Amino acid sequence: MTTLITNIKELLQVRETLVSKVSGAEMAILPTIKNAFLIIKDNLIADFGTMENLPEIKADKTIDATGKIVLPSWCDSHTHIVYAGNREQEFVDRINGFTYEEIANRGGGILNSAKKLNETSEDEIYEQSKKRLEEVMHLGTGAVEIKSGYGLTVEGELKMLRVIKKLAEDYPISIKATFLGAHAFPIHYKENKAGYIDEILTKMLPEIAKNKLADYIDVFCESGYFSVEETKKIMQAGIDFGLKPKIHVNQFNSIGGIQAGVQFKALSVDHLEIMNSEDIEALKNTETMPVALPSCSYFLSIPYTPAREMITAGLPIALATDFNPGSTPSGNMNFVVATACIKMKMSPEEAINAATINGAYAMGISETHGSITKGKKANLIITKPISSYYQIPYAFGSNLIESILVEGKILA
Ligand code: NIG
Ligand code: FE
């Protein structure tokens, strides 16, 4: 099956050779081709170029993209879209003056979601989660990482990871699974933290590894959650079971989580709302991708990741949604890109790089996703007719997507 897209006003994120991530000043450069064509063979990008160089081909399907922009689908490298119920009452409590921390301290927050998850059947969790997955696919997400972490029991964590596995089997987009048993301490382990960590290490991890239920290991490294020492212990155990770390750090406090992540060669360190100069220094010349989650900052009214300082220091940045019931009940990468430009002062080029190629890196799939490169997956966004790609962050509340291609097929 050959699909030809013609007359593309501008084709974004064109990379002739394999680029795994872009850092620092390179982030401001978004390579594009104006008046372009794109050829898709089966599920892959086969060729592209300017319209005057369009080869003679027999296409099974031709899409005329006059006035429209085509770009690789968003790569959302940090989500928690598998969960049960919602936390809308906590949202109203926060409007009425309670903080996210106060709500968590009285048994709400992650523990509230864990209670709901353990009371809900696997089939029901799948049904609720697949609606969110379908929603984000229609918003242009073509690859997504999904975490466990609302089970906090052996059975609950395995249940979540099986749901993620089933979603990965049932849907055509690429899904990476992350084990986040170390998301919070369950109530009955409040006075026995070592006991819960032991449960993660000796009961959860062996079972997860045996059943190949996760690609990565995550820890919420934060005051009141997992200390740096505990985070290191859990990362090491994950590595021993073949899981690379991708961790939550510096959301509310800078306590050394970034340095620990870098030490353990984490694929990414995520959140980074609170960053000091040592944190930025620690990330220089490493393989660890810093991931910002601006819609979480927006929803909780907490600081935004200092993107300008980080990019000036030569670092790369990836953008992701953090879609979850407590701190970010939204999986809209278009909003994330817009918020990064509006609130973090990233340029449209930097934000689009951060949400495509660098997002792909942060989930270990930059060889197959995140750019217009021959041989990569034909996961694409085709916009409505728009004046330029600046519209994507500028018209932040509008839906500019006309159609989505996943593995070369138009998403119905
Ligand atoms: O990434 N920070 C930790 N975990 C999630 C939120 C968890 C929740 O509130 O349910 C996050 O923001
Ligand atoms: Fe998160």
Image (spheres, rainbow, N blue to C red):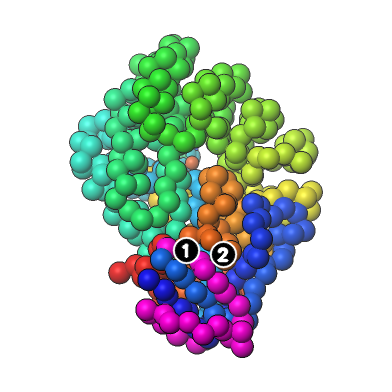
Q: Is any part of residue 236 visible from this angle?
A: yes
Q: Residue at x 73, y 48 (%)?
A: 315
> Where is residue 286 shown, x and y percent of the image?
72, 39
Q: Crowdedness of circle 1 by 10 Å Cα count: few (<14), some, many (20+)?
A: many
Q: Nearer the viewer, residue 90 or 216?
A: 216
Is there a contact, CB below 8 Å, between mark 1 and mark 2?
yes
Can you identify the residue that label 2 sits on? 374
Secondary structure state at the residue bearing disc 2? loop
> Where is residue 235 shown, x and y percent of the image?
55, 25
> Where is residue 411 shown, x and y percent of the image?
34, 67
Question: Number of marks in the image?
Answer: 2
Picture layout, residue 101 above or below residue 131: above
Can you identify the residue that label 1 sits on? 44
Could you give the CA–CA distance between mark 1 and mark 2, rounded to whole angstroms?
8 Å
Q: Nearer the viewer, residue 228 or 160?
A: 160
Q: Is residue 50 magenta?
A: yes
Q: Residue at x 64, y 28 (%)?
A: 264
Q: Give the mark, 1 or 2, whose residue is nearer the N terminus.
A: 1
Magenta span: 43-66
Q: Where, quadrant-wise, is the N terminus in this rendering?
A: bottom left
